[in-house]
Amino acid sequence: MKLKFWGVRGSINSPLSPEKYREKIEKVLSFSYGEDISDKKKISDLIDSLPAHLSTTYGGNTSCVTVSDDSTLLILDAGSGMRNLGNELISGKFFNSGISEYNIFLSHLHLDHINGLPFFSPVHFPTVRLNFYSHYKDFEKMLELQQDFNFFPVSLKSRPSTKKFNVLKEDEVISIGNFTVSSKKLNHPNGSYAFSVESSGKKVVYATDAEYTAGTVLEAFFPFFGKADILIFDTQYDFNELAGRFSFGHSTAEIGVDAAVNSEVKKLLLFHHNHESDDEKICLMYDSAKKYMNYKYPSASVEIIIANEGMEFDL
Ligand SMILES: [Zn+2]
Ligand SMILES: [Zn+2]
């Protein structure tokens, strides 16, 4: 089972601004004072030695994650990261180029989870078959509405690919190829659904856009998250932001730690980064989550990782 991240941001696209880019260059250059950067290798070593918020940038595209093996591709959400995925599928750089049937699971229909679909190039090909899955019974109509002529020049229906829209029932478990996919409703404005994908004894849980309040006690999700190799968790806010944005439907990295440790998860992936958080802030939230875990669960061995575009895992 392979897992790959194509979009990791929440709410809206958040490209690095020219001002932030310049600020980053200035900080990086200050690290190079007195260093030998006379060849490519030395420059590369210097970059590797930088703090994470300077050696990388945490995406700009919204939610899109793939889980695949040699014969089956599952696409979890159709945020703007889906555009790059589509281009790599067409060029044969990603996934088995002999297979053109793709399975798209939508956690919910907020724009940041569907805005990549109009730019997903495989829809132009008559040989491509797209199987959509969602719990929202009118979701085909909603996706068409996104591409209504008032909002977008080309309708989804008019694209030559074959499209099948499957409405999922609550707690329905489905099998596609070697994968078993189950789902669980999350607390989010107009709802959102977590997906658990299992194959050959490995398990990935994708649980984005969720708030865990008194009405949706975190413990209720432990069996669903239970013993996942990877838990992808909505960590949009820090605690101060969460306190001011009650009922916005998002969570924190510390709540992710509580969920991961108590569900005996191996890796916790911080995901759905706030569009208002810069790279430095995301790294501070990661540090805070690590400190929280070390203090509250000193013997815990969960690996905490900041999800980023292009990040891949082989399970
Ligand atoms: Zn979202
Ligand atoms: Zn949402």
Image (cartoon, helix red, strand yellow):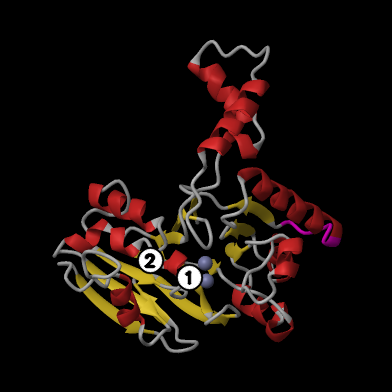
Residue 35 pos. (x, y %):
65, 14
Residue 287 pos. (x, y %):
74, 49
Q: Is residue 103 above or below residue 87?
A: below
Q: Is residue 109 above or below residue 153?
A: below
Q: Quadrant of the N terminus?
A: bottom left
Q: Is residue 121 magenta?
A: no
Instruction: Report the predominant secondary structure element of the magenta stretch.
Output: loop
Task: Give the residue at x 37% y 58%.
Answer: 82
For the record, the magenta segment spans 296-301
- Left or right: where 158 falls relative to 230: left
- Left or right: where 42 falls relative to 222: left
SS for callout 1:
strand
Task: Give the residue at x 58% y 28%.
Answer: 25
> Which residue is denoted by mark 2 in the rendering?
74
Spot the residue most to the front: 150
Looking at marks 1 and 2 on the same chain, the residue that comes earlier in the sequence is marked by: 2
Residue 267 image-quadrant placement = bottom right
CB atoms of marks 1 and 2 within 8 Å: yes
Residue 302 pos. (x, y %):
70, 57
Residue 51 pos. (x, y %):
67, 35
Q: Is residue 298 magenta?
A: yes
> Which residue is denoted by mark 1 in the rendering?
197
Task: Give the residue at x 56% y 31%.
Answer: 22
Q: Amino acid at mark 2?
A: Leu
Q: Amino acid at mark 1?
A: Val
Task: Give the residue at x 55% y 20%.
Answer: 43
- Towards the viewer: 213 or 261: 213
Q: Is residue 33 visible?
A: yes
- Towards the viewer: 287 or 71: 287
Residue 34 image-quadrant placement = top right
